[in-house]
Image (tube, rainbow, N blue to C red):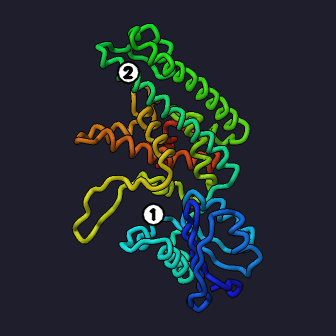
Amino acid sequence: MNKDITKFVGIDLGDRTSMAHVLDRAGEFVKETRLPTTAEALEREFGGKPRMRIAIEVGGHSRWVSRQLREYGHEVIVADARKLRLIYQNPRKSDRVDATYLAKLVRLDVSLLAPIRHRGETAQQHLSLLRSRESLVKARTQLVNHTRGMVKSFGVRLPKCSTESFARKVQAELPASLRPALGPVLDSIQDLSKRIRSYDQEIERLGEEQYPETGKMRQIKGVGALTALAFVLTLEEPGRFSKSREVGPCLGLVPKRDQSGDHDPERHITKTGDPYLRRLLIGCAHYILGPFGQDSHLRRWGLRLAERGGKNAKKRAAVAVARKLAILLHKLWSTGEDYLPFYPTVPSQEVSA
């Protein structure tokens, strides 16, 4: 226990108010207070005070709160809420109880909180571009589905086309009676497509100018600027992982385990980590396994898995390829090597008689 730590604090962050529970070095109760979740309230409560060790749960406010508390000289532990079953499965859960448990755990053993590290502010700003693009893509998809559904109910089926060209190609196919209702919707779809293209251009520029390491990743056919940049911004530093194989579990691309004795059932993947990056990697895996995928060791390995048959063989193969792809991307990033579709073969040495 660090001698410079005078108190141990657990803060249950709420959207408007937060509950703080304070213990001394001996684990004795000092005080409990409810304060507004604002920068001013945090400064009044923790600014200019002797060094404390403070535990908070990861959430919408944890990034700026942890940064501000560290500026005051305190040690801040951001706990992984998914791994604090003592808190989130407590039948008597409340703000006061949560703050109390956080304070006790941060005093006893920091590792019990499964600490996480927030990414840097610049990376978060750039990642917000990708998140905003994703929101626009989802909105456009909903509008396209709405248009097709409305027209279908009138006995008309719109032609198949890409989402990008949807508004332009179906304009003439709309029934006259639905033009007043769906005309503005098509205009919105067209406007969204224009804005999405603008995001794509900015993502390309960011990758080329500020994240040149994404160029190595894009040598893999099926990995574009969006996935490469999302991979770099989400993981932020290749040195976070001592081995590239650790990336798969970090992104939730490995199966859960519930082994006990001879009982070891097959489980779904854990789905821990960033869901957006996981979806992008699985999308790349589908492309690699699809008809336009480049012939490579990764593709052949995935196709062999898919050929094993079974109800979900293709889905499992895509997840397995996504996991291998994540490992490969980290390897290219950490070593700076060029991508080779096929592993180089070592020529056999002739043994002289």
Q: Is residue 90 above or below residue 117?
A: below
Q: Residue at x 74, y 68 (%)?
A: 71
Q: Is residue 245 visible?
A: no
Residue type indicated by callout 1: Arg
Q: Is residue 109 above or below residue 234?
A: below
- The reply to whether discs 1 and 2 touch (Cβ–Cβ < 8 Å) is no
* Label 1 vs 2, first from the N-terminus: 1
Q: Secondary structure at mark 2?
A: helix
Q: Residue at x 69, y 87 (%)?
A: 3
Q: Secondary structure at mark 1?
A: helix
Residue type indicated by callout 2: Arg
- Which mark, by number, is residue 148? 2
Residue 219 location (% of width, % of height) = 58, 34
Residue 80 location (% of width, % of height) = 51, 65
What residue does disc 1 label?
A: 82
Q: Is residue 304 above or below residue 32?
A: above
For the N terminus, the quadrant is bottom right
Residue 223 location (% of width, % of height) = 53, 35
Query: How many labels, in total?
Result: 2
